[in-house]
Image (cartoon, rainbow, N blue to C red):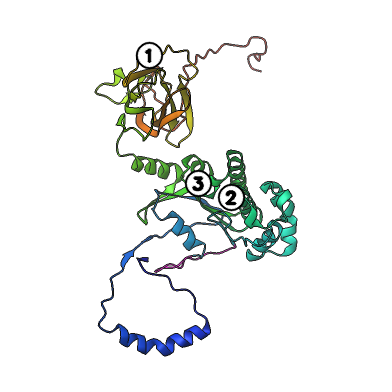
Amino acid sequence: MYRLGATQRRTETFQELIKSLVLAPVRKLHRMGEQIPEQEEFWALQDISFEVGQGDVIGIIGRNGAGKSTLLKVLSRIVEPTRGQVLLRGRVASLLEVGTGFHPELTGRENIYLNGSILGMKRREIESKFDEIVSFAEVEKFLDTPVKRYSSGMYVRLAFAVAAHLEPEILIVDEVLAVGDAEFQKKCLGKMREVAQGGSGRTVVFVSHNMAAVHALCKTALMLQKGRLVAIGPVGDIVQRYLAASVEGERNSIEAKRPMGAPVWFRRAEVFSAEAVGRPIRMGDELTLRIHFGADPAIRMPRFGWVLSDSLGTRLVGANNRYQADAPLERPARAGIISCRLGMVPLMPGRYQISLWIGNDAADSHILLDSLQFEVVAHDLWGQAKTPPLGSSALWWPATFEIEHDTQTAPALGG
């Protein structure tokens, strides 16, 4: 619990403490009759109770402000809980923000040893992992440079390398991996997968907004909402519940406003199936994207594109007309409509989202991320009274299968 508007007192020296005790009666007299302003209480976390076993890999998910980072700070002993207690058994390594636990004046080499010492490791244990850490972080040239001169990318590479390689019993990781580039993120996820699935008995607590990463790394997940624990269970179930809670119904159509200074912009966007009037979109339906746009009179060639993603945010397919030899508009238009027929889309049952962008040949001017959202339900496409289960994959392909006997190598009867 925090008190909003309250100032945090710094730690006093012994001399300041004695002086404060002596002057306390005088200050009390001066404050008599004064009206003390009320301070609003804010519970960042409340009524949370869960247990993580040795070797478990658990993901913590929730919207911004749900209390995820506060919970990790409590688990890492950075913040003392107002009520309740946290019981930890084992050495804990926390990676909550860039450079957690690093001393800016020390070099990269010195900080590796410092972090290892904090984790309770002996010097020979750190030395046995030293080369792996340096190689993973890719900071060989700057190893003897004070880390205060590191870029944020170098900082997080070294911090993650130390936390992952010094083999704590409990590894706590926040959304810091978003700082690194795509190649480093892939490398980190590979290392975390190795830690999580290596059978070493190490426990991992992982917070991320990347649902695909949570789904791939974790076996169990818990969901926070406004500081409270609302669900805990198998990662697939919790991720689907989180995604369903994030979307208040389907958004097959949206209205949009012009961003300041944009030469071309979305006014309205919709995705629909002419076959699905009065019923849900089914496997095998033909989809159409229709875009209503506004444009400055100088725009003669609007460029438009879209990307389709699954419920975990994994990009599946996309298209745009930037490389298409369209004829320019015959006359300047302040508004127009773009229709893009997707055809029979090979989507399996599940929830999907479409990101949109529009611009001209020079640049994109209006982007709507995950703006259109819809659900595809199972359908008996093959006439066999069978439908694929939910979550079996994202795409199906209308492939044809043929089975025939191989008379060349078929075994003899009774063989």
Disc 2/disc 3 C-alpha distance (Å): 31 Å
Task: Report the quarter where the N terminus lies.
Answer: bottom left
Q: Nearer the viewer, residue 51 or 302?
A: 302
- Identity of the residue furthest to the top in this view: 407
Report whether 35 appears left or right of 13: left
Q: Which mark is residue 18?
A: none
Which dot, 1 or 2, sits closer to the camera? 1
Q: Residue at x 42, y 11 (%)?
A: 327
Q: Which quarter of the rendered picture does the C terminus lie within?
A: top right
* Residue lying farthest to the front in this orientation: 298
Chief SS of the magenta region: loop
Q: Which residues are magenta?
A: 79-91
Task: Please tell me whether mark 2 sits on a helix, a strand or a loop.
Answer: helix
Type of residue at label 3? Lys
Indicate yes or no whether the magenta region holds residue 205: no
Which of the two labelled residues, at mark 2 and mark 3, occupies the earlier sequence position?
Answer: 2
> With respect to residue 200, does 36 lie above or below?
below
- What is the spatial separation of the Cα atoms under label 1 and label 3, in whole angstroms? 54 Å
Looking at the picture, which amino acid does disc 1 mark?
A: Leu
Which label sits on residue 152?
A: 2
Between disc 1 and disc 3, the foreground one is 1
Count of numbered badges drawn on the protein: 3
Residue 202 higher or lower than 121, as above or below: above
Q: Earlier in the sequence, mark 1 or mark 3?
A: 3
Q: Quadrant of residue 94?
A: bottom right
- Which residue, given by chain and number where applicable, does mark 1 sit on? 329
Q: Does dot 3 land on a helix, a strand or a loop?
A: loop
